[in-house]
Image: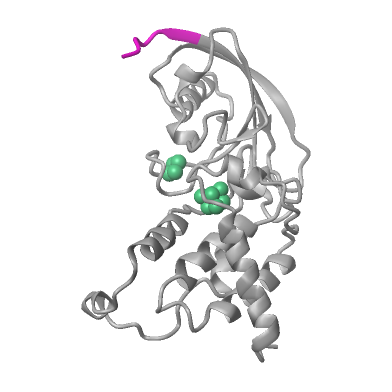
């Protein structure tokens, strides 16, 4: 069991008023922060002080603060979601930092994710990827119908692992090419592995990859930074499955 203590950090935070305005790092002191606090609670404390001083608080995205919604995210000391493996920014605790540390906090950087303000970026491009094919269009019935189709345990586990993707965009931020292949791979896999998603699997892969290019995401060159930084530890084997579906579409589909 660890005992909470208070530490002080120097924050260098990216401040930017909007997408078309130049941004820069500003320095703030985060004083007497409990090591039991989360990273976002620490920013809350800094923002409370800024607000009381009549200054503009730091804009950042968040919602559930439980690691499940995918809303939070920032690059902390060069790492998407910070230094802890398999952890979202909202679940990162101050105990992972030392008294006197300097912490650099920047937004996701990708052409497809324009900055809205400070650390908040527009991740609507991920929604557009889903709209381009990340769904099942056939009527698959209700839960009782699904329960009549037996799925091997190993296949169900793989589909559930892929479905753990929360759409946070850290994979894009971590990739030197700003590729969304891990996100698309996870979405294609969670559907393609199950009988209800198989009929449209190749078309889905083709449509989502075309949309990925159109939205300005880069290509995958097997850097594996996405897998290393993903807070849900989505495996790049999902990218291999996406590529297989894509090649099937090329060989067997008449999709234009
Ligand atoms: S694959 Fe991982 S990093 Fe990428 S959006 Fe999904 S949860 Fe986030
Ligand atoms: S705020 Fe929901 S995952 Fe972090």
The quadrant of the picture showing ligand 2 is top left
Which quadrant is home to the N terminus?
top left
Q: Of 48 and 198, which appears nearest the observer? A: 198
Q: Is residue 227 depicted above or below 15 in this figure?
A: below
Q: Could you tell me residue 170's position as x and y percent? A: 59, 45
In the image, taking residue 179 as reference, residue 185 lies left or right, namely left
Q: Which residue appears at 56% of the width and 60% of the height? A: 238
Residue 63's quadrant in the figure? Answer: top left
Horizontal and vertical percent position of residue 208: 62, 71
In this view, the residue farthest toward the left is 144
Name the image quarter holding residue 78. top right
Regarding residue 217, the answer to whether it shows in the image is: yes
84 relative to 17 in the view: left or right: left
Q: Which residues are magenta?
A: 1-7
Left or right: residue 166 versus residue 113 is left
* Between 99 and 229, the one nearer to me in the picture: 229
Which secondary structure is most common in the magenta stretch? loop
């Amino acid at each position: 069991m660890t005992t909470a203590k208070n530490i002080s950090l120097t924050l260098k935070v990216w401040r930017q008023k909007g997408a078309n305005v130049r941004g820069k790092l500003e320095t703030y002191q985060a004083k007497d922060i409990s090591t039991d606090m989360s990273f976002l609670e620490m920013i809350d404390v800094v923002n409370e002080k800024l607000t009381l001083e009549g200054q503009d608080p730091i804009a950042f995205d968040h919602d559930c603060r439980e690691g499940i919604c995918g809303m939070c995210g920032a690059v902390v000391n060069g790492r998407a979601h910070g230094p802890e493996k398999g952890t979202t920014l909202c679940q990162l605790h101050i105990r992972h930092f030392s008294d006197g540390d300097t912490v650099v906090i920047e937004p996701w950087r990708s052409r497809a994710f324009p900055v809205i303000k400070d650390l908040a970026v527009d991740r609507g491009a991920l929604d557009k990827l889903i709209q381009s094919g990340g769904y099942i269009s056939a009527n698959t019935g209700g839960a009782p119908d699904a329960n009549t189709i037996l799925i091997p345990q190993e296949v169900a586990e793989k589909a559930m692992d892929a479905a753990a993707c929360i759409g946070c965009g850290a994979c894009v931020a971590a990739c030197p090419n700003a590729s969304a292949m891990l996100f698309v791979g996870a979405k294609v896999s969670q559907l393609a592995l199950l009988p209800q998603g198989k009929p449209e699997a190749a078309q889905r892969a083709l449509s989502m990859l075309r949309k990925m290019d159109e939205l300005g995401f880069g290509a995958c060159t097997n850097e594996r930074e996405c897998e290393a930084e993903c807070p849900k530890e989505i495996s790049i084997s999902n990218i291999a499955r996406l590529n297989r579906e894509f090649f099937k579409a090329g060989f067997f589909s008449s999709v234009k």
